[in-house]
Image (cartoon, helix red, strand yellow):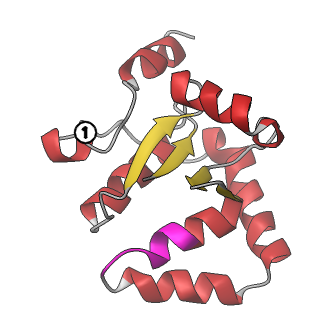
Amino acid sequence: MAIIYYDGNCVYCYNYAIWLIQNGLSHKYEFATLEGDYGQKLFDKHPEAKNRNSVIVLDGDHLEYQSTAIASLITSLPNQYKLLGVLLRIIPKPIRNFGYQLFANNRDKMWKTHWHKPNDYEASFFLDNNQKIKLVHSQL
C-alpha cells in the first residue's frame, strides 16, 4: 500500500484527493492527513519529511514530494489524465516545484470552494477521520 499524506486543513488538497478517487485512483493508495496519527508516524520514521510544505507519497520506503508526487499520482490514473502526468514530468522539476509552491503558498487567497462530502467508496480510501481536523480549522 502507498500512502498519500496531505494537509488536512487544505480544502484544495482534500478535494484533489477526492478528484483522484473519482478518476480511478487504485485502491493500492490510501490517504492520511499530515496532522493526524498517521502523519506523526511518517515523521517519526522519516524526519526529513517534517519540514516539507508538500503533499507526500510514501510507497514502501520511497518518498515523493511536491510536483513529483502530483505527477506520479496523475500518471497512475487509468484514463486520459495519464497523459497529463507524463506531460508534467517533461517540465523541469525546478519549474514544476516553483508552480507547486506558488499554489501552496497562496491557496488560502484563491477562490473559495467547499469540502466535498465523500460517499462510502471515497471514504474507504481515507485512513484517518479528517472531520476533526477540518472542524478545528473552521473554528479559527
Image: 105 above or below 127:
below
The quadrant in which residue 47 appears is: top right
Image: 96 above or below 87:
above
Q: Residues within 10 Å of mark 1 (few under 14, many from 20)?
A: some
- Look at 68% across and 90% down and name the residue there: 90
- Look at 35% across and 38% down and name the residue there: 126
Image: 85 above or below 4:
below
Is residue 86 shown left or right of residue 127?
Answer: right
Image coords of residue 59 (percent x, y): 55, 57
Of residue 22 and residue 25, the one placed in the foreground of this image is 25
Q: How many marks?
A: 1
Is residue 112 shown left or right of residue 69?
Answer: left
Amino acid type at image mark 1 = Ala
Image: 89 above or below 17:
below
Is residue 137 shown left or right of residue 97?
Answer: left
Image coords of residue 43 (percent x, y): 71, 32
The quadrant in which residue 77 appears is: bottom left
Q: Magenta stretch containing residue 30, yes or no? A: no
Point out the residue furthest to the left here.
Answer: 120
Q: Magenta stretch containing residue 76, yes or no? A: yes
Q: From this viewpoint, is residue 112 visible? A: no
Q: Secondary structure at mark 1?
A: helix
Image coords of residue 42 (percent x, y): 64, 35
Of residue 22 and residue 1, the one placed in the foreground of this image is 1
Q: From this viewpoint, is residue 49 visible? A: yes
Image coords of residue 10 (percent x, y): 54, 37
- Look at 61% across and 63% down and name the residue there: 69
The quadrant in which residue 45 appears is: top right
Residue at which label 1 appears: 123
Q: Which range of residues does the magenta coloring cover?
A: 72-78
Q: Quadrant of the C terminus?
A: top right
- Look at 42% across and 15% down and name the residue there: 132
